[in-house]
Amino acid sequence: MSFSDHFPILVVLIPLLVAPLASLFTKGRTAWALALAATWSSFLVSCFLLKDVLANGTVRYYLGGWEPPWGIEYRVDVLGGFVLLIVTAIAALVLTFGRRSIKSEIPERRKSIFYAAFLLCFTGLAGMTITGDAFNVFVFLEISSLSSYALISMGRDRRALNAAFQYLIMGSIGATFILIGIGFLYMMTGTLNMDDLAERLPAVSDTNTIRAGFAFLTVGFGLKLALFPLHLWLPNAYAYAPSAVSAFLAATATKVAIYSLLRFLLGIFGAGFALGAMPLDMILIALGLAAILSASLVAVFQKNVKRMLAYSSVAQIGYIALGIGLASQIGLSAAVLHLFNHAMMKGALFMALGAIAFRIGSSRIEDFAGLGKRMPFTMAAIAIAGLSLIGIPGTAGFVSKWFLVLGTLEQGLWPLAALILFGSFLALIYVGRILESAYFGTPKEGVEVREAPIEMLIPIWILVIANIYFGLHTDFSYGLAERAVMDLLPTAQTTVEVAQ
Amino acid sequence: MYNYWLAVFLMMAGFYVVIAQGNLVKKIIGLGMFQTSVFILYISMGKVEGGSAPIVTEGVEAYSNPVPHVLMLTAIVVGVATTAVGLSLVVRINEAYGSVEEDDIQELDNELDTIQESGL
């Protein structure tokens, strides 16, 4: 075996080993340098992996040389490689951005622990993406969740503690539901390997045990991905977490949960069962719409910009759920594409908010007054990422919404298309409120505010430029999303017909 | 079969405690019960009727399935970690608010909000 054959395990192993190492250093700066090196090398490895997958098809790795179904298998296909690239890229960018932001928000003695928890959270998310074993998903899910509770609780405001506790309760219930679901599947099939499960399930899928397992898994992942109405933990957790943590979690944690849900729904149960025999397609469309409308509406009235964007995240997850619920090639591709685009825009927005919090120490909308002149580059980043969030042509957000609308029209569901556009209109209002305050508000007298430091601006602008680039060149992102969906729906035509 | 009923009972009891209790420590206890019930569920499904413990012995034909037991070892570790993180959060909440009752914490947060509103 050559070195590159071990790439799948390296993505997970590097941060996992560096995490305890980072916690040993008392100096926050050393821990930061280690964490930075670990995330960037994971990112590089995942680039190679994706390239390999695109050239040679699915990459399989047997842990310890034990072949499945006895051993644990790591499996990277197009969708997995794509999500892994998002997770590793965001982690690397957020850490590059985060040194001074974290320094100003976390006390010195907790900093190395903070970086260790960050790396563990990253390990968990990368592991969930890459594993091909159902029980392994649960283990990695808990690794990422437990460390994210700790990360959120390190926010400056004491409300962060309560937010972390609420998330812990909801998250643990969700994870336990997932565990029960996996148990039911194991009970009927006697295997935990995902491919093996997919092979053996159709024979027993017409039993109540499998239906119950399906329900437990869906609700469990619904809690983790903050599907309306299971999203109640999310706004507070994102609003009170340290800025860098909000940026990282908003851009990756819910995305990985959506990815895992897709894995289980389409990869294991199959579209015919999950979105056809079970009424989940209708449920996802209904909940997605409810999320888009209610969360966008609530976002309009928020006074704290971080909280506003957190509600906007719930709405964006609604778009993704809607795309999955459409159960068509184009709807699913739009969902996967929106997953990618949303990670880019929310990553940029939350990092920019972090830069503003670093300079003015607040994320309340009144305090943004006059920032358009005082922090021009940061505010321009918010403006462009905000336009992408609304879905203005020329930005990435437009592309995914365009395909989503196409997907609804393809099935003649034009009221849905109208409601999607109405959701964009609501996004226009809340993004407009931020921009209005920043560009037309009168700044407070006697407060000197400088532009954010360059090391913060660069990662933000990388994501902003990516937003524009992928808004103009859709070949890479939409092409990948389409291929990923083709992989998940091997008999795309037939299953989709059953699903409708 | 009765162990499945036991698992369901424990699960619902734990779930009820998590929802109904306002005391954060009691919530963690409920969460612990909820997670423990899953261990019983898994261990019950590993039992093969008439099977002996999964250790190779002469004269034994049927063995129980050891895989669920191993899975539960992992889940127990996860459960302990969750409880530890949860309780340490409760300690921090108690330091910050001086209470572990959900209603009190809510009230203190609301007061803070009104102070911030009037201050501006």
Image: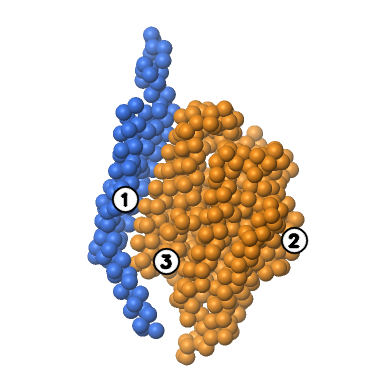
* Left or right relative to A79: residue A134: left
Q: How many marks?
A: 3
Instruction: Pinpoint residue A404: horizontal percent, then vertical percent.
Output: 66, 57
Crowd class of label 2 (few under 14; some 14 to 19; many from 20; radius 10 Å)? some
Chain containing mark 1: B
The reply to whether discs 2 and 3 touch (Cβ–Cβ < 8 Å) is no
Q: How is the image coloured?
A: by chain
The quarter of the picture where the C terminus of chain B appears is bottom left
Checking the image for residue A473, the label placed there is 2
Crowd class of label 1 (few under 14; some 14 to 19; many from 20; radius 10 Å)? many
Q: Secondary structure at mark 1?
A: helix
* Left or right relative to A409: residue A188: left
Chain identifier, orange in the render: A
Crowd class of label 3 (few under 14; some 14 to 19; many from 20; radius 10 Å)? many
Q: Secondary structure at mark 3?
A: helix
Q: Report whether mark 2 lies on the same chain as mark 3.
A: yes
**Who comes first in sequence, dot 2 or dot 3?**
3
Chain identifier, blue in the render: B
* Left or right relative to A268: residue A485: right
> Which residue position is annotated with label 3?
A240
- Residue A113 occupies which quadrant of the picture? bottom left
Instruction: Pinpoint residue A131: horizontal percent, then vertical percent.
Output: 55, 40
> Which residue position is annotated with label 1?
B18
Residue nearer the viewer, A372 or A436: A436
Instruction: Pinpoint residue A361: horizontal percent, then vertical percent.
Output: 45, 76
Chain containing mark 2: A
Q: Amino acid at mark 3?
A: Tyr
Instruction: Say which of marks 2 and 1 sits in front.
Output: 1
Chain containing mark 3: A
Seen in the picture, residue A6 relative to A92 is either above or below; the reply is above
Residue A74 seen in the figure: no
Instruction: Say which of marks 1 and 3 sits in front.
Output: 1
